[in-house]
Amino acid sequence: MAVTGSRLRNYVLAVASVGAASLLAAIVERHVAPVNLVMIFLLAVVAAALGLGRGPATLAALAAVATFDFFFVPPHLTFAVDDAQYLLTFAGMLIVGLTISTLTGRLREQAEGAKARARRATALWELSRDLAGAEFESVLLNAAARHARELFAGESVVLLPGRSGELEVRAGDAAALGRDEREREVAEWVEENGRPAGAFTSERRGARGLYVPIRGPAGDVLGILGVSWESDSPAPPEDPVRLLETFANQVAVALGRVRQEEAAEWARQGPRAPAGQGREG
């Protein structure tokens, strides 16, 4: 998924933060010793680490040392240094800046990871709640497609074999499959082989979407759950293959329950509609 633009923006903002620190340092330069200006640049590094991530913060640390040397250490407008003691200042400034960026970036990544895990846990709980409350197959499949679309930030689709045996879109974004015949071929490959394929996998990795099988208790493939992304879509959750397989497993359990209930009701009331075709609620 396209995240290059966002990353580039973060690096630009990191350099801009050093530029802002340089402007502030120029304003207070007359009132403090040059070595004390280091703290202003370190604040810029901390801000980059907190808001932009480890990579941009590392760039900010390097840019801060270079900017401090070039503009605020005599002789000005050159990287030459008259007083060798400033070399120790540069080394300390760089080490502290890189350490701050690494530690702060690590804390930021851990916080984002915790938030992502919380979102996944919430999404799985909401999915299981809606699937448990679904009385009809169509309601169940629509709930699965909706939750997959929301969590994976892409277009979702649920495919089940029709009367002819071919996969049919039963819920989700039918257009996501219809725009590219290769996507349908990947979904059919998943049905035949019973393994995930498409994006983020080793099989058919050139596909725009990720497709996983919905397996029954005996290991048979009941259908396919897929998610696809456009080039400008947000980045999907971490480990999307395993997460989508977890979704598919919950759908399989709920689908088996609904079909058993439909078959039992059909047996009680007589052959009105074949079981497993999804009574409309």
Image (spheres, rainbow, N blue to C red):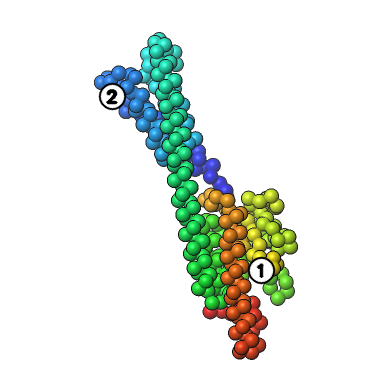
Q: Amino acid at mark 1?
A: Pro
Give how far across and how far down residue 201 sits, in percent. 66, 51
Asked if the residue at tag 1 contacts the one at tag 2, i.e. Cβ–Cβ closer than 8 Å, the answer is no
Give how far across and how far down residue 152 sits, in percent. 54, 56
**279 in relation to 119, above or below:** below
Give SS at disc 1: loop
Residue placed under numbered mark 2 in the picture: 28
Kindly tell me whether residue 234 is visible in this rendering. yes
Residue at 40% x, 10% y is 82
Outermost residue to the left: 31
Label 2 CA crowd tier, 10 Å (few <14, some 14–19, many 20+): few
**42 in relation to 111, above or below:** above
Residue placed under numbered mark 1 in the picture: 217
Q: Closest to the observer: 31 or 120?
A: 120
Give how far across and how far down residue 183 sits, in percent. 67, 58
Residue at 53% x, 70% y is 131
Residue at 47% x, 43% y is 109
Residue at 33% x, 19% y is 34
